Image: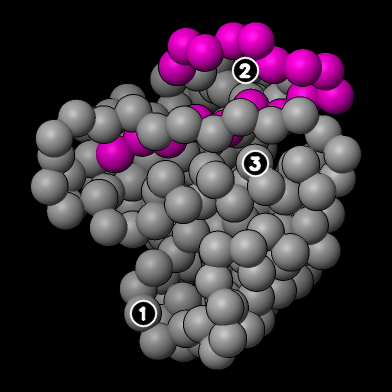
């Protein structure tokens, strides 16, 4: 089972990212589960969401404490949310940042990508979730970019879908180009 924990702030599409990730997995014939973890927080408050992907039925329902991958949609929550906590050996950390991030974990792959900047340029809004999913596909190889694109189409339509798809492709290509 491949487990993903997503950190960000309310209004950035953290929950939507987990949902689209699970849809992409489902489209590849895998079992998937996505769920959020937040209380009555308001927009801008730290939010966490989870996604599990497996070839077998998923019976677990608890939060993910030892993720194979962490996606950080807002780098300002890294310390306060202890975002890198529990990442497994040979895991992945994907951070929305144009700056280098310090990670003291050994045997993990850390990638920083300016997802907000890509979103602003191609979508016109600072919502980095689809961008990060494109990068996630390139970084981990767990899901195909085509599946991520189809998942984006299930959540968005028209011009918004096309802009998100284009931004996801840009991030995917950028991730593979820098790998």
The label nearer to you, 1 versus 2, is 1
Residue depicted at x 19% and y 30% = 39
What quarter of the picture does the N terminus occupy?
A: top right
Residue depicted at x 36% and y 79% = 125
| Residue that carries the numbered disc 2 in the rendered image | 88
Q: Position of residue 105 (x, y in %)?
A: 53, 23
- The magenta region covers 47-63
Position of 136 relative to 36 (above/below): below
Q: Position of residue 65 (x, y in %)?
A: 48, 14
Q: Position of residue 35 (x, y in %)?
A: 46, 31
Q: Is residue 167 visible?
A: no
* SS at circle 2: loop
Closer to us: 170 or 157:
157
The Cα–Cα distance between marks 3 and 1, rounded to whole angstroms, is 23 Å
* SS at circle 1: loop
Position of 11 relative to 8 (above/below): below
- Labels 3 and 2 touching (C-beta < 8 A): no
Taking the image as shown, residue 116 lies to the left or right of residue 132, namely: left
| Residue that carries the numbered disc 1 in the rendered image | 125
Q: Is residue 35 magenta?
A: no
Label 1 or label 2, whichever comes before in sequence order: 2
| Residue that carries the numbered disc 3 in the rendered image | 22
């Amino acid at each position: 089972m491949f487990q993903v924990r997503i950190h960000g702030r309310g209004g950035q599409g953290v929950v939507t990212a987990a949902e689209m990730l699970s849809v992409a997995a489902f489209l590849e014939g895998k079992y998937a589960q996505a769920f959020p973890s937040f209380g009555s927080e308001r927009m801008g408050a730290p939010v966490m969401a989870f996604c599990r992907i497996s070839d077998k039925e998923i019976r677990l329902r608890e939060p993910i404490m030892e993720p194979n991958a962490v996606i950080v949609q807002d780098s300002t929550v890294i310390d306060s949310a202890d975002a890198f906590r529990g990442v497994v050996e040979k895991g992945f950390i994907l951070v929305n940042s144009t700056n280098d991030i310090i990670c003291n974990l050994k045997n993990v792959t850390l990638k920083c990508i300016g997802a907000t900047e890509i979103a602003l340029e191609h979508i016109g809004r600072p919502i980095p979730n689809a961008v990060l999913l494109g990068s996630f596909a390139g970084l981990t190889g767990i899901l195909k970019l085509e599946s991520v694109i189809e998942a984006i189409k299930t959540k968005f339509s028209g011009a918004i879908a096309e802009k998100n798809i284009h931004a996801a492709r840009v991030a995917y290509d950028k991730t593979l180009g820098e790998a």
